[in-house]
Structures are given as C-alpha cells and as structure tokens.
Image (cartoon, rainbow, N blue to C red):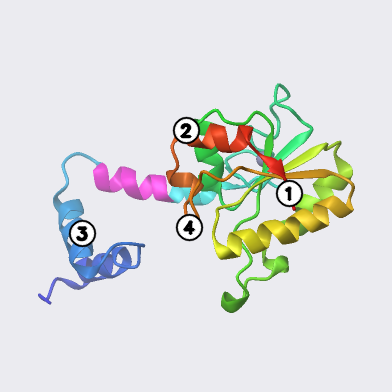
C-alpha cells in the first residue's frame, strides 16, 4: 500500500467503507476526485449532505421522501383502498417504474431473519396493522421477494392482516425463488401483480 498523504488516506478509508468498494477502487476514486475537473468534488459532498439532511422516511408508508407524507401517500388519484407491502424502497421504485400498481405502499424495511436478530419489532409491521385498522383498506397485496425469509414474512404478515378482517393477496409466481423485485422487468412485475392470488 503506497503511503499517501494522511488526508488522502482518510478519504480512501472512508470510500472503502461503501458497499461494493474495495481498497483498490477506493484509492482510484479518491485520486480521481482529487483531480476531477470542474466542481465535481464540491457538488458531490454538497449533495451527500443535502440528502442526509432532507431525505427521510414517510411516516405513513416508510418510503424515502423529502416530504412527509410522501408524494404517493398524498396522491388522491390513487386507489386508497389497496396497500402493496414491499420489503424495501427499491422494490417500491421498481413497481412504480413498471406502472404496475396504482394504490399505495407500505415498506416493511426488511424481512424477518431470526438468525440475524431481525424480529417482527424490527420491521414496520405494527404500523401496517395500524393503517389497516385506521384507513378504509379492502385489500393488502404482499409483494415480498421470494426467498425463504420473504415467504416466512409474507405468511406472518398475512395472518395478522387477515385477523383485522381485510383480504390479503400475494403476487403471482413468475418471479423466481431467490429473485428480487428490484431487478425484475416491468412486464413480469405487471403480470405478477395482475395474477395475484389470495394468500394462504
Ligand atoms: Zn408515504
């Protein structure tokens, strides 16, 4: 490892903490930023601070947003009686991009993973049940990624929602086991949603 000046070393160390960035890439990025043309370094640091300051979670659906409630929750042209439950914001964005769904969402912020210490209290399940109780909801669609943890989470959530007397459906297969909504094409997503079936 070459001995860079301490401030450059610090930048490399910080960049290498980002997901998917090893030390080599971090060094390359740091050297690039050092010499980058125009005001890239200044704009980059300013936008990092800006998103940290302004972007938060919608207090209703837990989507990322710079307003609270988010623009989806306040959009009265959407079907207010249907909630689509997803694992994370990336899944919501994929469904939105596909134009697959015109109701509102609820982002669980993960799936149950007991081995990693993620239990029901770590997810936004309680908040979903409150919404189901307070709002006039006729259907909850579970669009949780098909993994072992995802299936277990879907079954768990379905049981609780059904106890509140609301219909629960699950998006159709076609998204393969281990697949991820985020990386699924728009046609498959629309089909999965159209072909949803009542949850077991
Ligand atoms: Zn929202």
The residue mark sitting in front, 3 or 2, is 2
The alpha-carbon separation of the residues under discs 1 and 4 comes to: 19 Å
Callout 3 secondary element: helix
Q: Nearer the viewer, mark 4 or mark 2?
A: 4
Which dot marks residue 178?
4
Mark 3 vs mark 4, CA separation in Å:
35 Å
Distance between mark 3 and mark 2 Cα atoms:
36 Å
Q: Residue at x 30, y 63 (%)?
A: 15
Of label 1 and label 2, which has the lower sequence position? 2
Q: Upstream in the sequence, badge 1 or badge 3?
A: 3
**Could you tell me residue 68's position as x and y percent?**
67, 40
Residue nearest the observer in this picture, 62 or 182: 182
Coordinates of residue 129 in the picture (x, y in percent):
81, 52
Above or below: residue 152 compared with residue 94? below
Residue at mark 2: 186
Q: Quick check: 4 left or right of 121?
A: left
- Indicate whether residue 85 is drawn in magenta: no
Instruction: Tell me where residue 163 appears, x and y as whole percent.
Output: 88, 54
From the viewer's perspective, is residue 163 above or below residue 100?
below
Residue 30 badge = 3
Q: CA distance from mark 4 to mark 2?
A: 18 Å
């Amino acid at each position: 490892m070459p001995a860079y000046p301490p401030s450059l070393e610090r930048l490399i160390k910080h960049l290498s903490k980002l997901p998917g960035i090893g030390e080599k890439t971090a060094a390359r990025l740091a050297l690039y930023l050092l010499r980058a043309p125009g005001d890239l370094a200044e704009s980059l640091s300013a936008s990092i601070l800006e998103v940290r300051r302004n972007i938060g979670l919608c207090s209703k659906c837990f989507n990322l947003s710079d307003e609270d409630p988010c623009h989806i929750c306040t959009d009265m042209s959407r079907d207010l009686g249907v909630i689509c439950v997803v694992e994370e914001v990336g899944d919501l964005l994929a469904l939105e991009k596909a134009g697959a769904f015109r109701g509102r969402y609820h982002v669980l912020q993960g799936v149950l993973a007991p081995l990693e210490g993620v239990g029901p209290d770590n997810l936004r399940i309680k908040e979903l049940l409150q919404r189901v109780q307070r709002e006039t909801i006729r259907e909850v669609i579970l669009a949780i990624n098909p993994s072992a943890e995802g299936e277990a989470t879907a079954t768990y959530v379905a049981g609780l929602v059904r106890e509140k007397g609301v219909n629960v459906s699950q998006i159709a297969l076609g998204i393969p086991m281990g697949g991820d909504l985020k990386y699924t094409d728009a046609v498959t997503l629309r089909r999965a949603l159209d072909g949803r079936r009542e949850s077991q």
